[in-house]
Amino acid sequence: MQLLFKENLARIGKFKTDHGEIETPAVMPVINPNLNFLSERELKDLGVQAVITNSYIIRRTEKLRDYALKYGVHRLINFQGPVMTDSGTFQSYVYGDIEYNNKEIVDFQKNIGSDIITILDIFSRPDDGYETAKNAVYETYNRLNEIDIGNKIIAGPIQGSIYPDLRKISAKLMSKAPYLPIGGVVPLLESYRYDDLIKIIINSKVNADFSKPIHLFGGGHPMFFAFSVLLGVDLFDSASYIKYAKDNRVLYTEGTRNLKEIRDFPDWSPLFGRYKPEELLRETEKIRLKELSKHNLKAIFNEITEIKERIYENTLYQYVEEKSRAHPSLYRAFIEMLNSNIDNFYNISLKSPFYFYDNHSLKNPFVKRLIEFTFKYINNSKKCVILNHKYWRAGVPTADSVKEFYGSNDYNILVQWNNIFIPLELEDTYPVSQSVSSNIIDRDYQTYFISELKKINNDIIFYDDSITYDRKVRDYDHGKIDAVFKFQFNCDRSLFNSSDFIVRSKATGHIRNILRDSKILATMRNDGFFTLSIHGGSALQKIKEYPMSRVVVTPDSGEFNAKDFNVFFKFIKDFDENIIAGNEVMVVGENDELYAVGHSTVSGTEMKSYREGVAVKVHEGINKL
Ligand code: GUN
């Protein structure tokens, strides 16, 4: 799978099948081979790239079976794009044993020319006991081993019921398959157990091979798409569009309404202006089913389009935060997500501002990083002085400005940011300056936060006018670049020293470049972090221990990277596992010879999985030196 755009674990990607590429996130409508009433043109006009149908039903029905074996599944269901087939697992879950075994049903899918073939996995129910679920995980894995994957896209479902360790084991085992659905979740989706789903998706996703498509089996309701995609799901299948149509239910992003109870269709609906609800009710069942199916599919694909746009502009997290209020079960799921640890997968910063609402916002990984750094920052014998919002923004009366005050002492200076206190030096760094706040201050939380800080450094006071200032002992700008550097690279030592020269932007007055011997070491970006030049990379390399912030490449690749060309995943030999997605890295050879500097497109944890595409966007190669 190739990565195109990314927001933390969410991604826009693409992968190839024998019948064309699929750009993800994508939804595959379930096509009933007995009842196929939407043409390929109609499906494609609604945004459908690929469909899923059931090989078990085809095989069991003589007419369909003979036709599919003779002409292929694409002709059977009249769809020339990518077709995925399911195996009958779900039918065996609903109706009990089925009459074919794993090998037979996989061979059948191969013989009818399916693009994505599903093994006959064992469906684990949420209420299965641990041992039953464990046996199902291993039996599913045996079934994957029993078949010849070859160059086929075989879907190997991740099972494990609601047990985190079984999902983890299953994700690791099934990662041998080229395509990874998360299975056994339909009962949870049907009963709105979204919080359990969050845990299942996270445990499956973070333990699976990141380069492989992740599919949420049966996750066809748009209400949960954004949550799933934010946690790394790439594909869904949906039978709900038809199921709802059969019940005269009209689908919207947040839920359904009864056709009998609505005044009109929304303006995005293909039915808007063509039918009034009461007119559609008077139509034959066949027409109504077709028209409502179109409407429902449109609702599904609208949501996918919005989600993709959100990933592209880096606001999917905010979208999910909005969605969390659409239903109490979603809110519960949102809180579950905030309490889980997926921090490693968060980028260094996002291109959109951070929205600070309330104390839940403190659990966002960007804020968690900030808090963690604050605890490290005060872990010394210096006094801590807190400037509340008034002093931070209006200046400190005993000095002409906050910066002058900072220069006159050697205290840890903290400033109030929403309900917490953070190092002054990070005032222009993401997410601090790029945030929009509700400005609802929770004093009790602030008191609690100070008590937490005091566990590390007990010498904490609030600024007041009695604190006088002394002669100049330090320089704010140098203090700032040092603190930002330590925050950005999660280290105790700065690249910079006090004789480095700081250049400010004439237009904004902000710090722009850090120079040493008249050469640029680093540039401070709009998100307040640094981009390293090759000189900066070279200086950093001398003070960092191998393999910190390094991506080790083959000599062939290094030659190109030295000339400013990007690093491709397939040429990577080693890397620092702690790399943060979007952060600066040094591209080096096996003897630590520097080839280039750039930023990593993914985190260290993900780097080992990908094979296709760009791993490091190179800013500058060593040939420039
Ligand atoms: N459809 C819905 N859930 C599942 C599942 O767990 N496995 C398979 N193969 N298909 C499904």
Image (cartoon, rainbow, N blue to C red):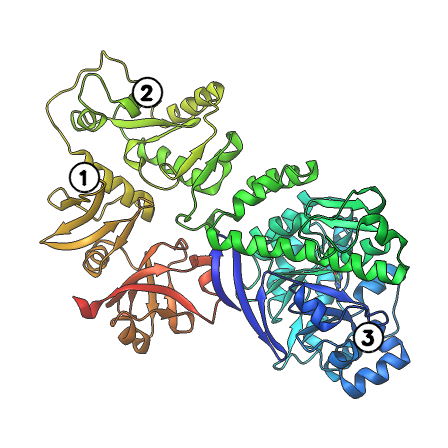
Residue at 22% of width from left, 52% of height from top? 522
The residue at the point 37 percent across, 36 percent down is: 432
Left/right of residue 87 with respect to residue 576 in the rendered view: right
Mark linked to residue 262: none
Q: Position of residue 622 (x, y in %)?
A: 21, 68
Side of 500 relative to 598 (left or right): left
Hey, what amino acid is under mark 2?
A: Lys
Q: Contact (CB < 8 A) between labels 3 and 2?
A: no
Which element type, helix, strand or loop, lies under badge 1? helix
* Residue topped by disc 3: 101
Element type where label 2 sits in the image:
helix
Give the number of the mark in front: 3 or 1.
1
Amino acid on which the number 1 mark rests in the picture: His
- Which circle, 3 or 2, is nearer the viewer? 2
Contact between labelled residues 1 and 3, with CB atoms less than 8 Å apart: no
99 with respect to 549 (left or right): right
Residue farthest to the bottom, as pictured: 70
- Residue tagged 2: 390
Residue 231 shows in this picture:
no
Residue 202 position, x and y percent, is: 59, 51
Residue 91: x and y in percent read 84, 64
Quarter occupied by residue 474: top left
Residue occupied by mark 1: 478
